[in-house]
């Protein structure tokens, strides 16, 4: 399960690490996209809006959890690169203790979040039901992502892909059962997602337990679960800025959603659909962030800073090329892409306008995400955090409001 990322071709390491991460994150994103697609086949615009708004909130929570877990990935990567097995065990144990507490707090606090979205009146009931059920599953989301962060820190990005692949298949089946068969609407979408997440956590726990049975030199003991100030400080010192950075980005989009929701149901549905499509397209920049942070962390731990810098260079080239190709292509297929999720002509027209301009950000974000991963590997995630706060406060929110 442990992979040495400090030797061999840098480009090959990036592709081998980032592709499974891309696929696993794609499958995780497919949760919301499947909910949105299937609800659109059996229910009207109100239910589609409820699921799009609810899934946007859940996406924000998920990326913030992933952000904090990035601290674990980097710290484990450094300790693996430095061949410090006992330190790796301690980081894993402290991560488990930290996120158990975090999941409990999140579950309680976020239930307060349900009624402050300025949701269009027709979609209030569905959105409330969707979020209430999904918030109850916060511990499951947390468990899956911390286990995945542990595997990625060990250089293994394939196992998380397998965990989520099983759950995604279950989610799609349950969506058709609860939404199409039992007509539960938005509640059925949330219930299917939550039960599927339960499956992913069970599979992930089985794999994590298997680490103890392999001769890796990593053995999780009860003493490793005892919180240690220095270890937690290192994890949170890297993870919190990344989490806040991603959280503020999502909050800014929720603010934009609130602005759009006040314009009516069609506008809200169009923006909700496009945000879901964008979250899929941005998987490549996101996979570059994860790949750079994990690969660079191992090389930094092994004292190979030059390889860490070359990893950044390769990632920037890959993400920029992808972003440019997708942006050009979307100018021609935007109506078709938005039309996959709705048959409403007005929503398709509005969504097509939105995505044709928004999509160019994918290329720029690829550069930013790659550098974020690099800074994160060096424990300087505050640099990316500062950049995002300034862009959100000075440009994104006020720009959207005035536009």
Image (spheres, rainbow, N blue to C red):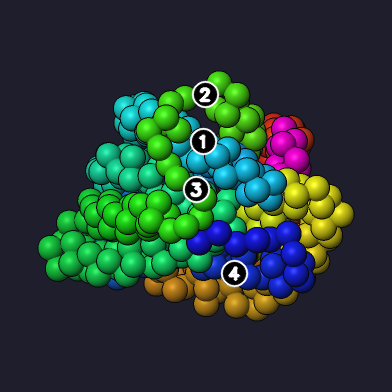
Label 3 and label 4: CA atoms lie apart by 26 Å
Secondary structure beneath disc 3?
Answer: loop
Q: Could you tell which of marks 4 and 2 lies nearer the N-terminus? A: 4
Q: Residues within 10 Å of mark 3 (few under 14, many from 20)?
A: some
Q: Could you tell which of marks 3 and 1 lies nearer the N-terminus? A: 1
**Does residue 118 appear left or right of residue 185 in this picture?**
right
Q: Which residue is mark 1?
A: 90
Q: Position of residue 280 (x, y in %)?
A: 54, 63
In the rendered image, the vertical position of residue 201 relative to residue 132, given as above or below:
below
Q: Quadrant of residue 242?
A: top right
Label 2 and label 1: CA atoms lie apart by 9 Å
Q: Could you tell which of marks 3 and 4 lies nearer the N-terminus? A: 4
**Does residue 359 appear left or right of residue 221 in this picture?**
right
In the rendered image, the vertical position of residue 109 relative to residue 198, given as above or below:
above
Q: Point out the frontmost of discs 2 and 3.
A: 3
Secondary structure beneath disc 1?
Answer: helix
Q: Which residue is mark 3?
A: 218
């Amino acid at each position: 399960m442990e992979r040495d990322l400090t030797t061999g071709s840098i480009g090959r390491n990036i592709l081998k690490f980032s592709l499974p991460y891309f696929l696993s994150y794609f499958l995780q994103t497919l949760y919301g996209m499947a909910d949105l697609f299937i609800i659109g086949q059996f229910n009207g615009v109100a239910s589609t809006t409820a699921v799009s708004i609810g899934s946007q909130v859940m996406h924000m929570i998920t990326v913030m959890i992933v952000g904090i877990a990035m601290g674990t990935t980097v710290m484990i990567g450094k300790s693996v690169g430095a061949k410090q097995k006992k330190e790796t065990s301690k980081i894993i144990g402290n991560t488990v203790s930290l996120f158990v507490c975090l999941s409990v707090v999140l579950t309680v606090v976020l239930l307060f979040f349900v009624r402050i979205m300025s949701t269009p009146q027709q979609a209030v009931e569905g959105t409330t039901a969707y979020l209430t059920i999904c918030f109850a599953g916060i511990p499951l989301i947390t468990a899956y992502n911390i286990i995945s962060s542990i595997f990625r820190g060990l250089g293994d990005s394939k196992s998380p892909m397998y965990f989520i692949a099983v759950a995604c298949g279950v989610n799609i089946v349950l969506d058709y059962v609860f939404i199409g068969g039992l007509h539960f609407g938005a509640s059925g979408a949330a219930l299917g997602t939550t039960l599927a997440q339960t499956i992913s956590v069970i599979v992930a726990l089985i794999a994590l337990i298997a680490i103890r049975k392999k001769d890796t030199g990593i053995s999780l003991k009860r003493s490793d679960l005892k919180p240690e100030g220095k270890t937690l400080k290192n994890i949170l010192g890297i993870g919190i800025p990344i989490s806040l950075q991603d959280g503020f980005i999502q909050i800014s989009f929720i603010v934009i959603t609130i602005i759009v929701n006040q314009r009516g149901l069609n506008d809200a549905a169009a923006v909700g659909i496009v945000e879901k499509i964008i979250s899929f397209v941005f998987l490549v920049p996101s996979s570059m962030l994860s790949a750079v942070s994990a690969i660079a962390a191992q090389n930094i731990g092994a004292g190979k800073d030059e390889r860490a810098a070359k990893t950044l260079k390769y990632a920037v080239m890959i993400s920029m090329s992808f972003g440019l190709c997708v942006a050009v292509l979307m100018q021609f297929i935007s109506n078709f892409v938005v039309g996959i999720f709705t048959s409403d002509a007005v929503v398709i027209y509005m969504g097509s306008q939105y995505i044709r301009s928004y999509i160019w950000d994918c290329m720029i974000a690829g550069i930013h995400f790659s550098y974020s991963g690099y800074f994160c590997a060096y424990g300087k995630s505050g640099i990316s955090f500062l950049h995002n706060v300034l862009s959100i406060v000075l440009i994104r929110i006020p720009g959207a409001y005035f536009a």
